[in-house]
Amino acid sequence: MTAIKNKDNKNEQNESEHQQAGAKRPDLPTYRAEEVSQHNNERSFWVTYKQGVYDVTSFLPSHPGGEQIYNAAGLSVEPFWNVYGMHKTKEIYELLESYRIGNLHEDDLVDHSDEEMWAKEPFRDRRLCVKTARPFNAETPPAEQAEGDGGGRGAGWGEGAADRTVLRGTEQVPEEGGAGGAHVCRKQEVGDERVKPVKGLSWRTGAIGNAVWGGVLLRDVLLAAGVNQEDTDGKHVTLMGADMDATGTYFSTSIPLSHALDERARVLLATSMNGAPLTKDHGHPLRVVVPGAPAVRSVKWLQCIKVSSEESPSHWHQRDYRSFGPSVSWETADFPSAPPVYSLPVTSAVCSPEDGDTVRPHKGALHVQGYAYSGGGAKIVRVEVSTDRGATWREARLRSDSAPPREHYSWTLWDVDLPASGPQMEIWVKATDSNFNSQPENFRDIWNIRGILSNAYHKIKVNVQQ
């Protein structure tokens, strides 16, 4: 089967296409920065962006970042958006402009250029599907995943600046290694099925990578430091990186101490990836790898490990990657009571052909390839593919690792030959893991405000060249 591409790379639209956000509007009044700064509380909350002045008071309860927005009270949001580049999308610019009330006086304009902040960015492969350039968030092209051998073709998502050697005295701790996947989620497809919009980066199927990591077990380091493995109830390990936000706060998250000490969990302090030292994008010189968990737990540029009786107090742990049901809105979300996500649900994807491709059958069949994955060390036991919207299913061939039970942290690659039928075919895929959890058919029943854990069937349409 040959795939004939009939579409451009689906990278995110460049910020330059949306330069109208913050441009001067002659139809609106002009405000001085001093007046804007006085609107800095819940009763009246103004911000600026370039030449624009915005009254976002009514938006405060639904801001995905929670109280982080208060750092910009009466000020410009530009320094924060230069760090949180996921704001720089058409949808966010349009939302911001809907709160526009005026223009900032020309004498009060400040250059918030972020060029110096990103002056030492490393080189990245041009094949990556870029979501945000600053900070760098990208996916691996699906076709590259399908052609891989399971060994680390994934992109590094998330970027920071500091390089710092922080772990010493570990030469007496035995080195460990193993394959593992790091996965974000498939957000955009929730919107594709016209369920309800979600907030955050629009990750698709390329937001997963598979690699062989080398380093030392976090368990061994904690035990060497005198941590009592019999006293884990209610305790957590906070992991702090060297990257910081616009307020000078370091990134951190935490995992339960019981998980960090679990021999099967194989939480790693990694110094190498695929036999080579870590690159900057992948966390050089030291990072955490928490197999089977969302990638947010695998802290890069690690500088501090702390055992405590509390979860990490950071915004990223308290307000991100927490689980809500479809009935919860931003206005009703109770983040402190929502459980953090420490394990990923079973999922799968078609990598080749891609959605919208024109394909030429070989001997009357389409060769379809993809991956499947499940968190918590569960093994993929079955992948099924349908071309009649779920009426019938065909089992795919699997290529999986030989890890012990509950330690299947690598993805499973699969392939199947499908009889060509008609000028257009719709292909669905679903997977089942060793806990016999399977994927839901659609996103409607699992929709949530952040779009995480979106593991419904992956569905694509291809044109068949007769």
Image: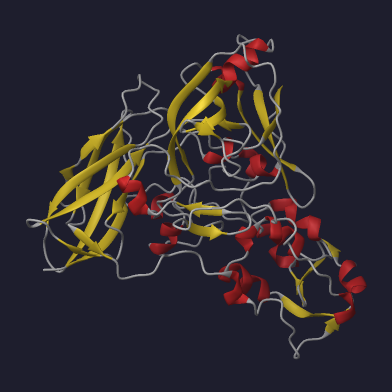
User: Who's the residue at 67% across and 29% down the image?
Assistant: 238
162 and 102: which is toward the camera = 162
Residue 94 x %, y %: 61, 74
Outermost residue, bottom side: 27
Residue 423 x %, y %: 15, 69
Name the side, left or right, on which 110 lies relative to 403.
right
Report the number of numbered marks.
Answer: 0
Asked where in the image residue 110 lies, by quadrant, the reply is bottom right
Q: Could you tell me which quadrant the C terminus lies in?
A: bottom left
Q: Could you tell me which quadrant the N terminus lies in?
A: bottom left
Asked where in the image residue 319 lies, by quadrant, the reply is top right
Name the side, left or right, on which 203 lies relative to 158.
left
On screen, residue 25 above or below 375: below
147 and 41: which is toward the camera = 147
On screen, residue 375 above or below 83: above
Instruction: Identify the image's colour scheme: rainbow, by chain, secondary structure or one colour.
Output: secondary structure
On screen, residue 407 above or below 367: above
Residue 374 x %, y %: 38, 35
**In the rendered image, is residue 309 in sight?**
no
Residue 389 x %, y %: 21, 56
Outermost residue, left side: 363
Outermost residue, right side: 34
43 and 171: which is toward the camera = 171
Asked where in the image residue 231 lies, by quadrant, the reply is top right
